[in-house]
Amino acid sequence: MTFPTIFQRLDEIINSRKSGNPADSYVAKLLAGGNNEILKKIIEEAGEVVLASKDGDKKEIVLEVADLWFHVLVLLAYHNIHPDSVLRELENREGISGIVEKNSRNKA
C-alpha cells in the first residue's frame, strides 16, 4: 500500500457516499452538514493531534493524524478537489525552501 494509493481509494469511497443517506453513512452525514460541519470536525481532529503530540504518545499521534487526514479528504471531496491536486502541489514544492515558497505566495 503506497501513500497515494490509500488516498485514491479513500477519495473514491468518500465520493461514492456523497449521494448516500446521512442516517446510514458518517461521510454522507458530514457532507450533508456542509462546509461548517466538516471544518468543525477538522478543528476537533487537529486539536486531538496537538494533544497527542504534547503527551508524546506515538500510537495516539498516528491514530489522530489518520483521523485528521481522513477528514481533510472529506473536505477536499466536498469542494470537488481530488487529492492528487494536493500531492502535485507537494511535488512542486519539493526542493524549494519553505521560506521561499511562502514568500512566492505572498507576492501573488
Image: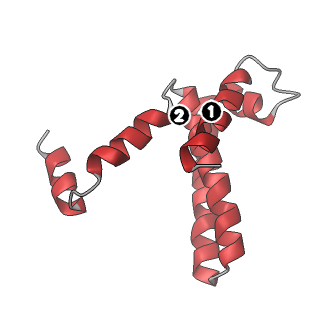
| Amino acid tagged 1 | Asp
Name the side, left or right, on which 95 lies relative to 68: left
Counting residues from the N terminus, which is met first, the one under dot 2 or under dot 1? 1
Where residue 23 sits in the image (x, y, percent)?
A: 87, 27
Closest to the observer, 86 or 45: 86
Residue 37 lies in what quarter of the image?
Answer: top right
Residue extending furthest bottom? 56
Residue that badge 1 annotates = 11
| Amino acid tagged 2 | Leu
Residue extending furthest top? 19
Q: Are marks 2 and 1 in contact (CB under 8 Å)?
A: yes
Mark 1 burial class by Cα count in 10 Å: few <14, some 14-19, many 20+: many
Closest to the observer, 99 or 97: 97
Where residue 82 sits in the image (x, y, percent)?
A: 50, 29
Residue extending furthest front? 1
Q: Is residue 36 visible?
A: no
Which secondary structure, mark 1? helix
Q: Can residue 61 be seen in this view?
A: yes
Residue that badge 2 annotates = 76
